[in-house]
């Protein structure tokens, strides 16, 4: 091989030398830049950060470059004596962030992603001292939403900023959150081995002067929804401020919070502090009402008596999952499993509510009543129906689909037997709350149907369609008697159905506007002889009953057809036929004014000698009914036409009773037909009513 072939051409050698020289020059310049800490890059870096965050950013508070060091080897590292980030345009006079002794690290890959439109991701931020002002206005604007003020980066916990790790020796945060009605001051340390002075939240003679020096130690004091607030948060190691992914490490955390009469305790793990990602653990919460718990979480929960809840909570991405091992509300003992997904436009709550016992009184505030442990305030005008306003706006904040499977539902002191069990499906969609597929058993009978409350407007619409059958009155209704062994005032099997609709903002308004009808039938029963005699106001016979004891009278036919128009209730037919007498009821009552204007007429069983006792008038109000005798001459003879005026409406409703299809309705129809035939014989063949087509 010749010497010419052993060496590259002169031009190639020159190119290699130039390239090597350039590389050495660049390496030298880079080394000089690293040694000098790249002071000429400070201004472009500030401008780039300001442009991305849409906030003015200063890497040194006094505007000089002293104390500012930038390193580019292996990534971008910025060391500054000071860091200052301005507040949003709507609160520019108050900086969002001020820090001293700052060390910030960024990856080149994250900077490349930033050019493609991704949020600014900071690998780590370490500070000796950090002061932050976090504010959210009632319209939703928040100082921690970086990026365009009008359109922060969707789906990011802090808008256009993703901060993976934050370490602070001494930190202070002021929080002013109008939607949550929160005004708090937080002192914290987020670095191993740092002792932190106690704040006013814990200052007392018995409180320690420093917090444990490990992981995150934070304490808060202030006011939440008008109540004093104190809270503490601890972790076993420094937490990721915002997670870099789903595979980040989980850190043990412990949270304690008190606000007014509410208390929260949580022990578990967390992967991401600000976004609460990877949250899983056990909690205990107690407070004055479930509604107060739901508001800060964006949940629509009923207003209840005092509650205590414990269970397990998991949060990943947009889904919150809880296994509610026990929820006690007053006398109620419940459990359930739920998933709350914030991804839809209206968050969705799904799951199942179960439990040993639900006491209706504990949910009283949700239907306009006071809880069991609260005194019932007197209503103006002596009215009885609850007028507490429903929280209709809460129905529009989320959707829900909950299966209800309760072992027992206690109906209150007026009822001797509870519902065992109750199954239903609760739906909340676009402000419309529906309880459907109701299937309940009680007192050997059943209750079913559907309830609906449309809360999309300021005044709600409501509908009720219910049916019941086979309810044993002596088991269902509590009937205390003074004498031992005395029979119940009323017994038998009750059935019927109703269909009503109305409008209003409370139970009183809705019932006061109700229109529709209700059909009730009663069979295989008995009625206290004393009640019948008192209805007839026959003093001598009443005293006789009291002397010889209260003999129950068998009831062969009991029926009522009630028509409602804008809260006005008119009985088209209302009667009770016993072996002794027949009681007829006419007149009206108003659910709007709660005024009573009813008349009771009692006739002997055989209508002979076509006599009626003096009618009894029922006046006054639902809260204070008043009985009196009808004034005027006593009509001793009941004309056939008048008798048929009582019987013919009964004939009209027998086909409706027969539509019930159960044995109770059939027995009621047969007994009422016998009553009609008996009355027709007395009235005479020429005026006999036509038998209805059944």
Image (cartoon, rainbow, N blue to C red):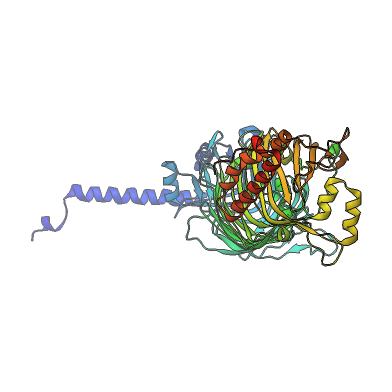
Q: Nearer the viewer, residue 438 or 178?
A: 438
Residue 269 visible in the current orientation: no
Which part of the image, by quadrant, shows the C terminus? top right
Q: Nearer the viewer, residue 230 or 18?
A: 230
Name above or below for residue 446 compared with residue 46. Answer: below
Q: Nearer the viewer, residue 432 or 617?
A: 617
Q: How many marks?
A: 0
Residue 611: x and y, percent? 80, 41
Q: Looking at this rendering, what residue extends furthest in the left direction?
A: 1
Q: Nearer the viewer, residue 6 or 588?
A: 588
Q: Quadrant of residue 354?
A: bottom right
Name above or below for residue 12 compared with residue 311. Answer: above
Residue at the image point whose x is 77% and y is 42% from the top: 385
Residue 262: x and y, percent? 74, 55
Residue at the image point whose x is 89% and y is 58% from the top: 546
Which part of the image, by quadrant, shows the N terminus? bottom left
Residue 588: x and y, percent? 75, 35
Residue 290: x and y, percent? 69, 52
Residue 272 visible in the current orientation: yes
């Amino acid at each position: 091989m010749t010497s010419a072939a052993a060496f590259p051409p002169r031009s190639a050698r020159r190119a290699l030398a130039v390239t090597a020289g350039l590389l050495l020059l660049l390496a030298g310049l880079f080394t000089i830049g690293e040694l000098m800490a790249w002071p000429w890059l400070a201004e472009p870096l500030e401008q780039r950060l300001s442009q991305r965050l849409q906030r003015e950013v200063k890497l040194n508070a006094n505007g000089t470059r002293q104390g500012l060091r930038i390193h580019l080897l292996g990534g971008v590292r910025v060391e500054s004596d000071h860091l200052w980030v301005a507040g949003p345009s709507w609160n520019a006079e108050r900086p969002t962030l001020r820090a001293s002794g700052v060390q910030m690290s960024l990856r080149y890959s994250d900077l490349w992603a930033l050019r493609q439109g991704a949020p600014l991701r900071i690998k780590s931020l370490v500070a000796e001292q950090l002061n932050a002002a976090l504010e959210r206005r009632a319209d939703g604007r928040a100082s921690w939403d970086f990026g365009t003020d009008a359109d922060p980066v969707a789906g990011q916990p802090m808008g256009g900023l993703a901060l993976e790790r934050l370490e602070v020796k001494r930190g202070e945060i002021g929080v002013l959150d109008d939607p949550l009605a929160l005004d708090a001051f937080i002192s914290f340390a987020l670095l191993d081995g740092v002792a932190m002075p106690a704040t006013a939240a814990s200052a007392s003679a018995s409180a320690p002067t420093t917090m444990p020096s490990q992981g995150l130690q934070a304490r808060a004091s202030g006011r939440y929804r008008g109540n004093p607030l104190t809270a503490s948060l601890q972790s076993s190691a420094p937490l990721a401020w915002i997670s870099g992914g789903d595979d980040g490490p989980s850190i043990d955390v412990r949270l304690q919070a008190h606000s007014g009469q509410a208390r929260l305790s949580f022990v578990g793990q967390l992967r991401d502090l600000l976004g609460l990602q990877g949250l899983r653990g056990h909690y205990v919460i107690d407070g004055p009402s479930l509604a107060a718990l739901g508001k800060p979480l964006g949940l629509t929960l009923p207003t209840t008596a005092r509650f205590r809840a414990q269970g397990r909570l998991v949060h990943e991405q947009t889904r919150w999952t809880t296994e509610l091992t026990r929820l006690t509300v007053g006398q109620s003992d419940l459990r359930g499993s739920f998933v709350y997904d914030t991804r839809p436009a209206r968050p969705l709550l799904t799951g199942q509510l179960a439990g040993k016992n639900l006491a209706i009184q504990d949910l009283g505030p949700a239907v306009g009543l006071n809880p069991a442990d609260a005194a019932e305030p007197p209503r103006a005008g002596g009215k009885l129906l609850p007028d507490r306003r429903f929280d209709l706006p809460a129905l529009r904040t989320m959707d829900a689909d909950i299966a209800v499977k309760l072992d027992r539902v206690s109906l209150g002191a007026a009822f001797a037997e509870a519902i065992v069990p109750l199954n239903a499906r609760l739906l909340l969609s676009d402000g419309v709350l529906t309880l459907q597929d109701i299937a309940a058993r009680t007192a050997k009978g059943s209750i079913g149907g559907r309830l609906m409350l449309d809360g999309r407007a300021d005044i709600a619409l409501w509908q009720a369609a219910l049916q019941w059958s086979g309810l044993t009155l002596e088991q269902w209704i509590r009937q205390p008697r003074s004498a031992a062994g005395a029979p119940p005032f009323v017994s038998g099997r009750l059935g019927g159905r109703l269909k009503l609709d109305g409008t209003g903002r409370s139970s009183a308004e809705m019932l006061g506007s109700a229109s529709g009808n209700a059909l009730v039938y009663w069979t295989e029963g008995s009625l206290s002889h004393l009640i019948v005699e008192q209805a007839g106001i026959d003093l001598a016979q009443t005293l006789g009953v009291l002397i010889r004891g209260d003999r129950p009278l068998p009831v062969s036919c009991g029926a009522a057809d009630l028509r409602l128009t804008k809260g006005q209730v008119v009985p088209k037919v209302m009667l009770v036929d016993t072996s002794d007498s027949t009681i007829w009821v006419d007149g009206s009552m108003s659910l709007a004014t709660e005024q009573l204007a009813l008349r009771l007429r009692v006739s002997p069983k055989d209508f002979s000698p076509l006599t009626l006792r003096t009618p009894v008038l029922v006046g006054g109000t639902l809260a204070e009914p008043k009985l009196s005798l009808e004034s005027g001459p006593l009509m001793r003879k009941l004309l056939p036409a008048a008798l048929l005026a009582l019987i013919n409406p009964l004939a009209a409703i027998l086909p409706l009773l027969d539509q019930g299809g159960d044995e109770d309705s059939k027995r009621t129809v047969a007994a009422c037909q016998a009553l009609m035939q008996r009355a027709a014989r007395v009235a005479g063949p020429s005026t006999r009513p036509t038998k209805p087509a059944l």
